[in-house]
Structure formats: structure tokens, C-alpha cells
Amino acid sequence: MKCIVGLSGGVDSSTSAYLMKKKGYDVIGCTLKLFNNEKAETSIRDAKSVADFLNIPIKVVDCTEDFIKYVINYFIDYYKSGKTPSPCIMCNEFIKFKYLNALREEQKADLLVTGHYAKLKKYDNRTELHQGKDNKRDQSYFLYTVNGNILAYAEFPLGNYSKSDTRAIAKEVGIQVAAKPDSQDICFIQNNDYISFIKRKLEGTFAFKPGNIVDMNGKILGQHNGIINYTIGQRRGLGLSGGPFFVYKIDAKQNEIIVSDKEGIKVKKIALNNTKFINEPFEGECRVKIRSNGEKIKAHLQYDTINVCWFVEFLESEYGAAQGQHCVFFKDDQILGGGEIK
């Protein structure tokens, strides 16, 4: 039995490779080169070092062109248009699993393996995605767009482990990245400074030009310093007297930030774009997350034949649903699918 393991140079993927080798698999490591900077080169060196330690072959696959197209350009375009991007979801769908599965097919391997904290349940003609054991580390939210045919060949060895379990295994085995800190930022941006990153790409565009902050009636309350600096639901840093005010909408066309009181950012119903289901479509009562670190909310999911899109209606009004974020559907700990908030 042979498997392809996505080896990023971190403790999660390294431990996953070890666990698959321990199971008796013929393991081939695969490092995806996503961008060109010192951070990427360090990750590749660490991955090669782990592969040497585990005595497994490793392939480095250059994905930089597609990563720019599907992740970086998307990230910039969404901020430019006042939306909230989810680059990890895009990367999983268009880069990570696509390239790993292509290598799996090329090498005639049985499985593709990653270090995600999530679970898969496989049946004869069906693969289900479930949340991982460690709720704090669970990454199933970011995986709902991965094609079900690919998930059928996937395995997540860390699904039943906590992060502390993973580090303990890596330390006991002697994997050199056992104590490597977790990345807390967007992988292609140094020091999590996305404003500086986008500024280099969009300097001189309206995304950084001052404009008006207005209330729901269009009354000017103050000035903003570029729409790029604001997010839906934001309260702090608006520089407005009175209030409290919250960002209700970012109008890129008018270069305006629209604010309201807290009641104004409540929503009862949201429409979705690009809705995907891992298996068959589902309508009815479920729970949803409208941000990766949010709670699961009771809701009703339905398809609107007139507007030709899926809608989520919350049982109770929710705050701060941002255009561009993803709404993911759950039944207990199973991920049914999701869509981008329209």
C-alpha cells in the first residue's frame, strides 16, 4: 500500500507521515511550493529534513502560478471589493488537494494524506467529512469545498488526536520540528501584515483612499482611511463620536463605510453563492458556522427557485455576517457542505 503525504515542514504533516509509515504504508512526501519568499524556502528545507529523518522520498511540486491565480489574486480582489476572503478554503479546493491527488494518480498510490484535524467516514459509495476530536484545532470548516471524489482517497491521521497529542508523538519519535511554533498568520504574508502586503499590490487605488463613513441614512459621520482597513462588524478604530457604531457594509464603488448600531448588523437570513455539498444536497434544519472560529448556529437551509440560490435562515438573528465569508452546514459533527455569503 502506497500513500502521498502533504509534507509542509510543520509538526502536523510530519507526524502524519510518521503515523502512515508506522501503519506499514510506502510513504512518499510531497511539498507544494506555493510562493517565493524566505518563509517558503524554510518550509521546504524543514520538510526535506523530516523526510530524511523518516527515510522517505520527497517531491517538491511548484504550484506558484496557480497559487497566485486562485489564492493571492483572489485575496487581493476580495479586499479591494470590500469582501472578506477565505484563502485557506480556496487553497484546499484549487491547490492543495488538486496537486496532491494528481501526484497520487501519477504514482498509483492508494491514499493522499494531510495533517488536517478532521475525520472521514467511508462507506461503499459515500465519504463523509466530520469534525476532528480537538474542537480547538478542528479544520473541517476549511475542507467543505474539496471534491467528494478526492475525499474518497484522502486520510487525516490526526482526526482523533489533540494538538498536544501530536506534539508528544513527534517529540517521542524525535521528529526535529516537534516544537516548531504553529503558524498564526496567512502563509504567504510575513508577520500577518496583510495591509502592507495588499498596499504593495494596490498602492494608488481607491482601496487606500480616504472616504466617508456614513450612517444608514447616508449622513456623513466621519472619514475613513481606506476601505482595506475595515471589516464587517468592526467596532474599534472607527474614530467616531457617539455610538457605539459597527461596520454594517463596505461600499467599494462609492468608497464608503456604512455604520449602524448593534441592532443594525443583525441578520435573519443570508443568501449564498457557489453552494457545494459533499454528498447529496440537503434542505431543512441544521447548524451553521458563518466564520471559522464561530459557534454552530441553529438555522434552516433551503433552495430558492426564484432567485436560483441557497438561503440560510437563522432561528435567531446573528451579528456580522460578512460578504465573502463562508457559511458551512453541519449535522451534529458532520459537514454537509457550505457556500459563500452573498
Image: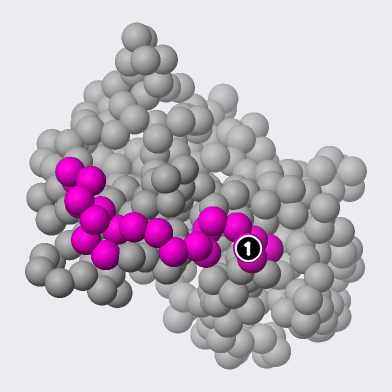
The magenta-colored residue range is: 201-222
Q: Residue at x 51, y 47 (%)?
A: 81
Residue 284 at least partly seen = yes
Residue 258 pos. (x, y %): 28, 51
The amino acid pointed to by label 1 is Gly
Residue 107 pos. (x, y %): 89, 47
Q: Is residue 90 left or right of residue 249?
A: right
Residue 282 at least partly seen = no
Magenta-drawn stretch contains 47: no
Residue 48 pos. (x, y %): 83, 77
Residue 162, located in which quarter of the rendered image?
A: bottom left
Q: Is residue 264 left or right of residue 30?
A: left
Residue at numbered disc 1: 204
Q: Residue at x 34, y 30 (%)?
A: 271
Number of other residues with Cα within 10 Å of mark 1, as a class: few under 14, some 14 to 19, many 20 or more: few
Q: Residue furthest top?
A: 306
Magenta-drawn stretch contains 208: yes
